[in-house]
Amino acid sequence: MVASGRELLTLKGHENGIYGMAFFPDGRRIVTSSDDGTAKIWEAAADRPTGQTGRKLLLQEGRSVEVTSVALSRDGQRVVTGSADHTATVWEVSSGRELLTLKGHTDRVMSVAISPDGQRVVTGSSDDTAKLWDAANGRELLTLKGHAGVVPAVAFSPDGQRILTGSQDHTAKILGGGERPGAADAPGTHRMD
């Protein structure tokens, strides 16, 4: 229980520091991302027949650089990772298969989030921008400019209609309202200042 502060489990297996982590919606699994170039899915509760805990269930490799961030879809079926290679990747949880690679940032992707409906992904980068993507086909929908520093934090509002970005320029910005981003044929650019 959180109230006791008692350690319940230690997950060991990454070879370098952990940058991101999240609980699956069912609370039984955890996903972590690391600068060892991997994302790992772990069992978060004791396995009743064996009593084993903290077991690695899936390893997502394929990056030779840090996996800087991780997010889960609300249904727990997809994981999005951000990487130092300037990309974000959408993975299928059940198979560990890479579904999409989101390319467009000019520096490392520091933060990722999936909209509540699972249809969009937002990424924040060391290139001082955030980008909105279509989660079905990987198309860039919008580039959000206006920060004067790295964007290490992004989030969707609970209704998915607004995006929150946080920057090392000491500001947080909220974008939303009006026409749904991506309704136009070509990706757009929106100044946040």
Image: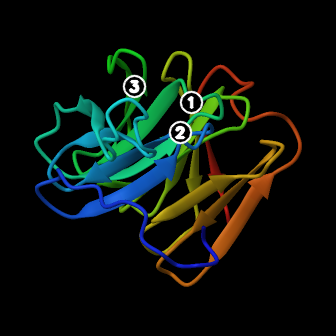
Farthest bottom residue in view: 170
Amino acid on which disc 2 is placed: Leu
Judge whether 182 appears above or below 46 on screen: above
Q: Earlier in the sequence, mark 2 or mark 3?
A: 2
Question: Whole-percent x and y of residue 95?
Answer: 35, 15
Q: Is residue 147 left or right of residue 34?
A: right
Residue 11 vertical placement versus 63 (above, below): below
Could you tell me the amino acid type at mark 1? Answer: Gly
Q: Which mark is residue 72?
A: 2
Pointer 3 residue: 91
Q: Which residue is mark 1?
A: 76
Q: Quadrant of the N terminus?
A: bottom right
Residue 24 as seen in the image, left or right of residue 44: right
Please tell me how crowded label 3 is: few (under 14), some (14-19), or many (20+) other residues with Cα within 10 Å: many
Question: Label 2: how many residues lie within 10 Å, few (<14), some (14-19) or many (20+)?
Answer: many
Q: Residue at x 42, y 71 (%)?
A: 7
Q: Is residue 105 visible?
A: no
Q: Quadrant of residue 58?
A: top left
Q: Quadrant of residue 53?
A: top left
**Of 51 and 167, which appears nearest the observer?**
51
Residue type beneath disc 3: Trp
- Residue sitting farthest toward the right: 178
Quarter placement of the C terminus: bottom right
Do labels 1 and 2 touch, CB within 8 Å? yes
Residue 61 pos. (x, y %): 18, 32
Cα distance in 3D space between marks 1 and 3: 11 Å
